[in-house]
Image (spheres, helix red, strand yellow):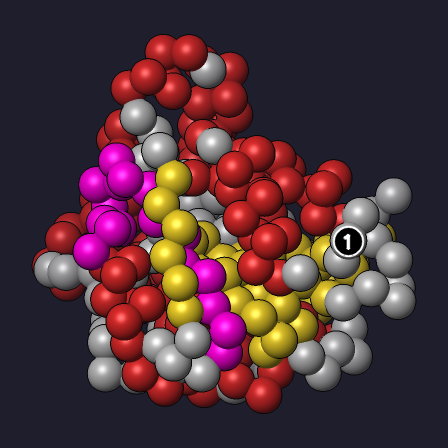
Amino acid sequence: MADAMIVTTDDRVRLAVEVRGSEGAPVLLLSNSLGTTMAMWDPQVEALSQRYRLVRYDGRGQGQSACPAGAASMDRLGRDALAVLDALGVERAHFCGLSMGGMIGQWLAARAPERLLRLVLANTSAWMAPPSAWQSRLEGVLADGMGPLAEASLQRWFTPAFLAAEPDRADWIRQMLLANDPQGYAACCAAIRDMDQRRTASLNTVPTLVIAGNADPATSVADAQFLVDAAADARLVTLPTAHLSNVECPALFTLAVIDHLG
């Protein structure tokens, strides 16, 4: 059974956190993509919580977590992850993040490596150009809500074969997107708009697994290879998926994570 809690950050934002698994096991912190909630990790929870003290949370502005008005930053999102660990009294943890969660993982590797055991960066990039596209996206969401964006996101996040074969799972993610608070989504868009972690990628000395989807139009295999080449100790696994590789190919994704974390 999961333990639910609220963590309050130093800027008084309330983050929803869930904890599963044995208290004596190594901690694994999961961080989800922009536009989803911690439920995105449901396909991995059973297997991972048998091996780790599994902690997942809704990033600010996502799911049940609050978000103040205005833009967020990657520094702020990274410090939110540290706030979750601090609230649980965890000095060091494994970390697995996908897309925006992987950007947070990159920040942690550069800014707080002493807090990490091993790192998984999935379907992510050090830089998401051009900034103008993110500005247009956040303005569109604030003006028109999440509806138009949800359909476009599904086309980027999954292969046509998955959308045809798994309509219920695709609709599960669609409903997650539609439930977003546009203000919270826009705040996190701003964090990605302003992010450039290419120069700090070489600071990553944490043992790292980078996961890429070979049909991912958002964060390419080349983006993943950049992170591998820049880091001191990293390797690449490529899966036959688009962007949400943990949902489209859950078994292979989970096995890759367990193999890396040990």
**Residue 176: image location, x then y, percent:** 50, 34
Asked whether residue 37 appears in the rendered view, the answer is no
| Kind of residue at badge 1 | Arg
Q: Does the magenta stretch include residue 18?
A: no
State the SS at label 1.
loop
Q: Give the range drawn in magenta.
A: 206-222
**Residue 258: image location, x then y, percent:** 63, 52
In the depicted structure, whether residue 63 falls above or below residue 206: above
In the depicted structure, whether residue 151 falls above or below residue 216: above
Q: Nearer the viewer, residue 149 or 67?
A: 149
Image quarter for residue 52? bottom right
Q: Residue at x 57, y 59 (%)?
A: 260
For label 1, the residue is 51
**Residue 227: image location, x then y, percent:** 30, 68
Image quadrant where one finds the C terminus: bottom right
Q: In this view, does 88 lie to the left or right of 144?
A: right
Q: Residue at x 24, y 66 (%)?
A: 226
Q: In this view, does 98 lie to the left or right of 231?
A: right
Q: Is residue 189 left or right of residue 44?
A: left
Q: How crowded is mark 1: few (under 14 residues within 10 Å), some or many (20 or more)?
A: some
Q: Which of 41 and 7 is in front in this view?
A: 41
In the depicted structure, whether residue 24 falls above or below residue 19: below
Q: Nearer the viewer, residue 185 or 54?
A: 54
Q: Count the marks.
A: 1
Q: Does the magenta stretch include residue 208?
A: yes
Q: Which residue is drawn at 50% across and 78% down?
A: 206
Image quadrant where one finds the N terminus: top right
**Residue 150: image location, x then y, percent:** 34, 32
Asked whether residue 255 appears in the rendered view, the answer is yes
Q: Residue at x 76, y 67 (%)?
A: 26
